[in-house]
Image (cartoon, grey):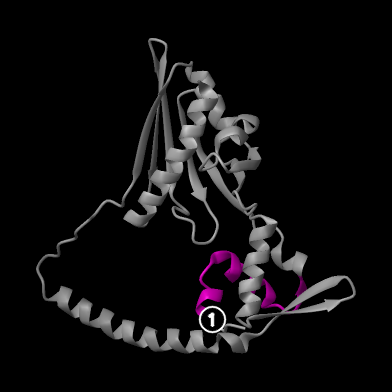
């Protein structure tokens, strides 16, 4: 067992599980229902909690029940309390420094973004459908020729959900979902991306603009709000491979 309380509380899904167990022991179904991620992801999150000693599993007949073990979080709580005291002293120093200044200068740096443009000999409606039809999405939304998309769900409306499950060459599944923020057929789609733990770009924004002229349709995808250049590089490569698949589907 690796007691790593910091990793245990590092992901919002695991924090939600811990909060649900705060009221007492509960079944796996009660703890993990309506979290919006795949069963393999749930299994992974539970294993991390159990390995850290934060959650203990008891099998009663055919029911698996989970119980919170708060003592495993003592190291994390102690560290946070210590850091809080340090941060409060630092913030006091900063406030005193700013009070002595007549003006402050704020440097704003735009977060990195990915922009990819593709042109197709197809009508705009066909390109829009390729991004919104679940059957078509399954043909291309995966980063490589040796991957496949085993599941695609689309609720095409503002506030609706998009969910894709990709399977790599080793059979491991990788799920992600999004919430649509703009749906304007056939010219514009926008969504907020929600990925699994450690996936680059979780919580970022995607914007797809489709324009048709003289028999050609241009699609410009912008993925913004990324945490750093490494995330941008990962997503640039991933989207590029996905769109290579899409090129073959639309051709």
Q: Is residue 61 above or below residue 202?
A: below
Q: Quadrant of residue 145?
A: top right
The range drawn in magenta is 5-27
Instruction: Left or right? Give the position of 77 relative to 53.
Output: left
- Residue furthest to the right in view is 61
- Circle 1 — which element? loop
Q: Main secondary structure of the magenta part?
A: helix
Residue to which mark 1 is pinned: 4
Residue 208 visible in the shown view: yes
Instruction: Left or right? Give the position of 242 relative to 163.
Output: left
Q: Is residue 3 above or below residue 120?
A: below
Residue 245 pos. (x, y %): 51, 33
Q: Nearer the viewer, residue 32 or 237?
A: 237
The residue shown at (65%, 52%) is 171
Residue 169 pos. (x, y %): 60, 49
- Residue furthest to the left in view is 102
Q: Is residue 126 above or below residue 13?
A: above
Q: Is residue 153 above or below residue 8?
A: above
The residue shown at (51%, 30%) is 246
Q: Residues within 10 Å of mark 1 (few under 14, many from 20)?
A: some
Q: Is residue 20 magenta?
A: yes
Count of numbered marks: 1
Residue 156 visible in the shown view: no
The residue shown at (59%, 64%) is 13
Residue 119 pos. (x, y %): 39, 23
Quadrant of the frame with the N terminus: bottom right
Q: Is residue 236 magenta?
A: no
The residue shown at (21%, 82%) is 93
Residue 120 pos. (x, y %): 43, 21
């Amino acid at each position: 067992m690796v007691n790593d309380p910091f990793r245990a509380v590092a992901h919002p899904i695991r924090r939600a599980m811990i909060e649900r167990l705060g009221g007492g022991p509960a079944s796996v179904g009660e703890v993990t229902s309506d979290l919006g991620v795949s069963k393999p992801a749930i299994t992974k999150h539970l294993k991390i909690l159990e390995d850290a000693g934060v959650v203990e599993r008891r099998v009663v007949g055919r029911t698996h029940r989970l119980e919170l073990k708060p003592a495993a979080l003592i190291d994390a709580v102690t560290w946070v309390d210590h850091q809080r005291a340090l941060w409060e002293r630092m913030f006091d120093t900063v406030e005193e420094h700013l009070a002595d200044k007549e003006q402050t200068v704020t440097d704003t740096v735009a977060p990195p973004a990915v922009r990819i443009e593709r042109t197709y000999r197809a009508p705009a409606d066909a390109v829009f459908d390729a991004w919104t039809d679940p059957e078509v999405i399954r043909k291309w939304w995966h980063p490589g020729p040796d991957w496949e998309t085993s599941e695609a769900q689309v609720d095409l409306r503002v506030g609706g959900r998009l969910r894709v499950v990709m399977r790599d060459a080793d059979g491991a599944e990788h799920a992600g979902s999004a919430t649509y923020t703009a749906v304007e057929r056939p010219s514009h789609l926008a969504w907020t991306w929600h990925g699994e733990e450690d996936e680059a770009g979780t919580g970022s924004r995607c914007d797809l603009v489709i324009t048709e002229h003289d028999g050609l349709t241009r699609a410009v995808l912008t993925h913004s709000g990324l945490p750093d250049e490494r995330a941008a590089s990962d997503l640039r490569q991933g989207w590029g491979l996905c769109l290579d698949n899409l090129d073959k589907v639309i051709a």
